[in-house]
Amino acid sequence: MSALTFHNQVAVVTGGSGSIGHLIVAALAERGANVVAGYHQHDVVVNALQKTFSEQVLPVQADLREPDAGQLLVDTALSRWNRLDILITAHSMIANAPVAEMSLEQWHAVLQVMLRGTMGICRAALRPMQRARYGRIVTLTGYQPLAGALDQANYAAALGGVLGFGKALAREVAAWGININSVAPGLIERAQIAAFDPSYVPWATNIVPLKRLGKPNEVVPTVLLLASEAASYMTGQTIMVEGGWRMV
Amino acid sequence: MRGLAGQVAIVTGASRGIGRAIALELASWDVKVIVNYQHNATLAAEVVAAIQAAGGSAQAVQADITQPAQVQALVDTALATWGAVHILINNAGITRDALFMRMKDHDWDAVIEADLTSAFLCAQAVLAPMRQQRYGRIVNVASLAGLAGNVGQTNYAAAKMGLIGLTKALAREVTADGIVVNAVAPGYIQTEMIETLPQWLRTWALDVIPLKRFGTVEEVAPAVAFLASPAAAYIIGHVLTIDGGWVMP
Amino acid sequence: MQLDLTERVALVTGASRGIGRAIALALAASGAAVVVNYRGSESAANDVVEQITQQGGRALAVQADIADESSHDALIKAATGNFGRLDILVNNAGITRDTLLLRMKADDIDAVLNTNLRGIMLLTKAALRPMTKQRWGRIINMSSIIGLTGNAGQANYAAAKAGLLGFTKSVALEMASRNITANAICPGFIETDMTAHAFTDELRAAALQRVPLGRFGSPDDIAATTVFLASEAASYITGQTLAVDGGWTMY
């Protein structure tokens, strides 16, 4: 197996300032990749990354609700480094509510960013990957579409959509050496759990065999594996990183 | 199927194909059926006539179920006509197949709205009456394409796997109120959609399906009726695949 | 929907108590003649038979240890000889020998695998002969969500139940052309005599935390799914795993 190094490779990471996303950007850069770190908020985080990795990390602000945001990120990578090997979608947006109280705006907002945003940037990334006959796409999804989740019907539907989309696309582009997989984290210590019902985290912690939430850096190695050349015979897969929560 | 008699069901997209078969199946168990359709009033009327001819009760209701107001009107019609809604079958769906790199944005959006957002809206609209009676069954008609992906159907696979995500999230929210939510995932079923497939694909599919034939809509409908019945009280958030053994997830 | 099982003949293993008993009664209520297999509980098995016959059904109790394949022919013949055919095999009998793997004896592993996997494989093989001749058959294997998720203290049981899922799919593939389907049911935590005694209040409370429905299942929940899979209504369903678990796994 080739070591998990990414020298001379170029990656686009969405959600590059997020709890998990910024760790992915750093891990890729540490291993030699040049990375476009797409972000929407928290420019302090990506600016710090750029400081650490100087030329290797290029923060680009982009709002994935905008139709051309994905294209912008991809074009930036191409114009700066002239290639694109890796796309990692790590952006996240929630608008939690019980279904009975969820507005159509809340439903559409999450679908727009999480599903359509992912679809749009995949389309932008596929063109250079097809030309190079090589590509790795890793979508960060979650346990929600696999196990359900309270107050997150929109998020579960959107991430389920990403999983179904990814499998269909994996079949379409396999012939170009482009592999698409997903990492589905369980409950991770990240910003979005502040929005959960306070009773939920203790309940889930008690159920998880490891008896704790995951840390963001525990999600990263699986992402790196799937982003690497080593994952050449894996496509259309969903790998859960969930402390043994479901095991299904 | 014990316990279905006298209940009221809404079946979306019930004028044709699998939806039609589900409407007829439920009616055969003395369920009163709202036969929802969007375009084809004639076919919907034929379904209603077939149910009535067999001594059942049915009513056709036109609605574009991507529109909240029309969804509410659909549910209100059921409540006004028969006083309750016990069963919702989210069956309506469309396809707009194309290879991903050639897929138009409006074809992506149309499928997501028609196959996924519509199910959210319909489920949302029936929750209040189901909660009030502390009983309900919601069955979402997903697809094997959602579970396994399918070439030329990135939009459809996204919508149908999204529907499975919705199924499970909603299932957790509403079990305490006596509302049970599940999904079925049909494989290749003999419908008009199948007729449009190229011959090589049909031949290939028949070869890989262990039962060596396409399913019939009459083989999907009973599974939906089972999950819609009181007997399925302990099956929650499950995806039942009906595919002749193709995938065996 | 064709849930009517009139003229069908079923063999249910481990049918004297609990889930097996509920399945035998439900199949009979749908019209099937039922061979009620038991290993030790003769009087309980006779009660099941009596209850079925009192309601006008046909049933017969037959003793056999599923782990012992020399008993299998007699079980199959009890169906074909007395009722003329065998349409439905419900592999329900199972045993547990719970302990942590570090303390598990080879005997604990052998006993569980012999009954819960090897015995089922051989009995299924025997049942496939009449089913193949009839060109109609239903194999329904009682696995468990433990086979999907694993469980501390049940390494042997989990291995057997997971193995059963692979076995089910293989049978489905091999027998599809003969109009014989094979499916598995994964019950979650089901309230039976066995579980009533085997679990402390603390364990029950911990288990319930995982069940969105907020209650344990009843044997009747499993029986209803079994009748559905055994019927003509499930003719295009094969190789599938149905979780009947109150939402535990959302499988």
Image (cartoon, coloured by chain):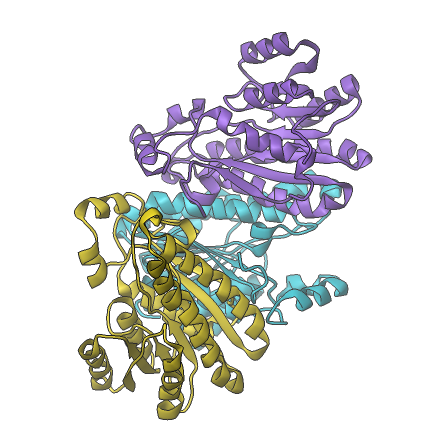
Chain colours: A purple, B cyan, C yellow
Camera-nearest residue between B122 and A91: A91
* Figure check: C119 above or below A100: below
Q: Which residue appears at 49% of the width and 82% of the height?
A: C131
Q: Which residue appears at 66% of the width and 30% of the height?
A: A3
Camera-nearest residue between B49 and C46: C46
Camera-nearest residue between A179 and C112: C112
Q: Quadrant for the N terminus of chain A, please.
A: top right
Q: Position of residue C49 (x, y in %)?
A: 24, 82
Whether residue B103 is visible here, answered yes or no, is yes
Q: Which residue appears at 31% of the width and 44% of the height?
A: C210
Displayed quadrant of residue A224: top right
Whether residue A117 is visible here, answered yes or no, is no
Marker count (numbered): 0
Residue furthest to the right:
A131
Q: Is residue B139 left or right of residue B195?
A: left
Camera-nearest residue between A69 and A1: A1
Q: Position of residue C79 (x, y in %)?
A: 37, 86
Displayed quadrant of residue A244: top left
* Figure check: C43 above or below B140: below
Q: Which residue appears at 35% of the width and 56% of the height?
A: B85
Residue furthest to the top:
A51
Q: Position of residue C138 (x, y in %)?
A: 46, 75
Q: Is residue A229 left or right of residue C221?
A: right
Q: Position of residue B41 (x, y in %)?
A: 56, 61
